[in-house]
Image: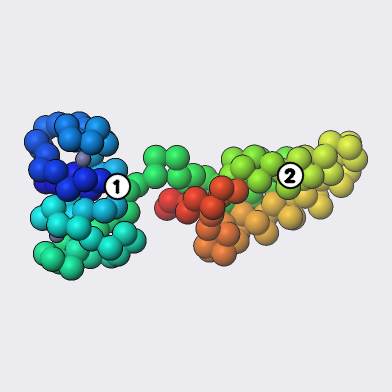
Amino acid sequence: MYCKNCGNQLDPNAAVCLNCGCAKNVGSNFCSNCGRPVTPGGAVCLSCGYALTPAANPDAKSKLAAGLLGILFGSLGIHNFYLGYTGKAIAQLLISVLSCFTLSFVSAIWGLVEGILILVGSINTDANGNPLKD
Ligand SMILES: [Zn+2]
Ligand SMILES: [Zn+2]
């Protein structure tokens, strides 16, 4: 395999590229299969046809977890805290807490709707624009 950052040939057992110091599978400039330059963001290598999967984002939030949190704990805004939408999360939490939970159905319905939108993919990024993972 080849370094996706600099195109240097990698020892399959090496954790990082000895040429540029990048971790394996980090970078999108070169094909990890043939080592030729590829178009960043391209789906396949034009030289060898190898599918170029985008580097998995270890910080990607779980769509299922966020959706379920919205459905189960929407009145507390937990799913929005999880996804980093802190402003919305605090609004949902405050609606519940400041009304001594008499209005918690408002944020519960709000969270329920958002939870469903997350599960069906209408909301598919977190607050930083990172795609949610399945
Ligand atoms: Zn490298
Ligand atoms: Zn290739």
| Mark-to-mark CA distance, 1 and 2 | 33 Å
At horizontal 11% and vertical 32% (from top left) the residue drawn is 13
Mark 1 Cα-neighbour bin, 10 Å: few <14, some 14–19, many ≥20: some
The answer to whether residue 110 is left or right of residue 39 is right
Residue 4 or 82: which is nearer the viewer? Answer: 4
Disc 1 residue: CB within 8 Å of ligand 1: yes
Q: Nearer the viewer, mark 1 or mark 2?
A: 1
Residue density around tag 2, few if under 14, some if 14–19, many if 20 or more, within 10 Å: few
**Ligand 1, image quadrant it occupies:** top left
Point 53% across, 63% down: residue: 120
Residue 52 picture location, percent across and down:
24, 58
Q: Residue at x 77, y 45 (%)?
A: 92
Q: Residue at point 29% right, 52% down? A: 28
Q: Which residue is mark 2?
A: 87
Q: Amino acid at mark 1?
A: Gly
The mark nearer the N terminus, 1 or 2, is 1
Q: Circle 2 sits in a helix, a strand or a loop, which is it? A: helix
- Mark 1 and mark 2 residues within 8 Å of each other at the beta carbon: no
Q: Which mark is residue 64?
A: none
Q: Is residue 35 left or right of residue 131?
A: left
Q: Is residue 12 above or below residue 47?
A: above
What is the three-letter code of the residue carrying label 2? Gly
Task: Residue 27: give its label.
Answer: 1
